Image: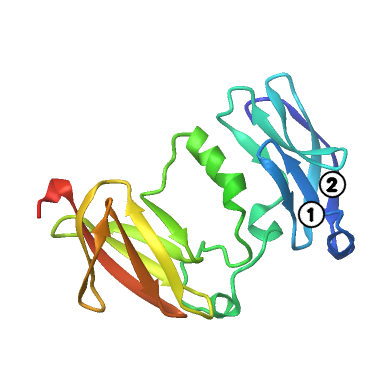
Amino acid sequence: MYYDVDALDYSQIDDRDIRNGTNVIKTDQGDFAVTQAVNYASVVPGKSAKTFACYGDEVVGVQSCAGRFTWITIPLSNAFGGLPPAAMSATDLPYSHNVHGIPPDALLMPLLERAGVQPPVAVSGSRTMTLVHEAADGGVLIFVINLEDETAAVTIKPRQAIADAVDVIAGKTLAVHDHRFAIDVPAHSVRVVHARTLADGT
């Protein structure tokens, strides 16, 4: 690592901690309850770093003083929540796909924004997965995947202003207001939307 951080000890947040409520990680961006047992390292930040996250009296996350690098010793892929059973039994997910848990947006998004990383689309509403690819004939293809057991209702706003949006599977034009559109995705299903940007023309 490019700045000095010393490891003090290695321990675990276990099921007893979770049951007793002693499972809360305190960070600069709020408090977050770990929901699955995980191992972690307690560390001491050096002169070029500052404390970012604590578990009790132990430091479990550090950040460079410039805020460009953050290291949390708790494995976020295991510590928070988990995908529904339908996802756990899926055989066609990408090899590196995280099927164990999903870190809270309130923890990750400020770090990404601080680093200048922005998602290609803003999604609000039900819990879904969204993938975006450029379309061969212009615009973008937006894949909205619902792994839950009930219909998902989401509103999507691409980073670029869009002229129109078409549900490719249903063959239906979606209403666009303020460069955003709403779509319902049945349980365990996917919807594909072709959105043309204003730069592509109407």
Residue 91's label in the rendered image is none
Image coordinates of residue 104 in percent, x first then y, are 61, 53
Residue 55 point in image, percent of width and height? 82, 44
Q: Quadrant of residue 132?
A: bottom left
Side of 122 where 34 appears, left or right: right
Q: Residue 111: x percent and y percent?
A: 56, 38
Label 2 sits on a secondary structure element that is strand
Q: Is residue 42 left or right of residue 86?
A: right
On screen, residue 46 versus residue 201, left or right, reads right
Sequence order check, earlier mark of 2 and 1: 2
Labelled pair 2, 1 in contact (Cβ < 8 Å): yes
Q: Quadrant of residue 49?
A: top right
- For the point 66% across and 64% down, the residue is 81
At 47% from the left and 66% from the top, the residue drawn is 128
Judged left or right of residue 28, residue 171 is left
**Could you say which is closer to the camera, residue 6 or residue 199?**
199
* Vertical order, 2 against 145 (above or below): above
Q: Quadrant of the C terminus?
A: bottom left
> Considering the image in quadrants, where does the N terminus appear?
top right
Residue 10 is tagged as 2
Give the residue number, with chain letter if any, for mark 1. 39
Q: Pinpoint residue 118: horizontal percent, then vertical percent.
A: 42, 43
Q: Nearer the viewer, residue 103 or 167?
A: 167
Residue type, mark 1 in image: Asn
Toward the front, the furthest residue is 177
Crowding at label 1, few (<14), some or many (≥20) Cα neighbours within 10 Å? Answer: some
> Element at badge 1?
strand
Q: Quadrant of residue 135?
A: bottom left
Which residue is outermost to the left? 202
Q: Residues within 10 Å of mark 2 (few under 14, many from 20)?
A: few
Question: How far apart are labels 2 and 1 at the CA level?
Answer: 7 Å
**Does residue 191 sit above or below 44 in this rendering?**
below
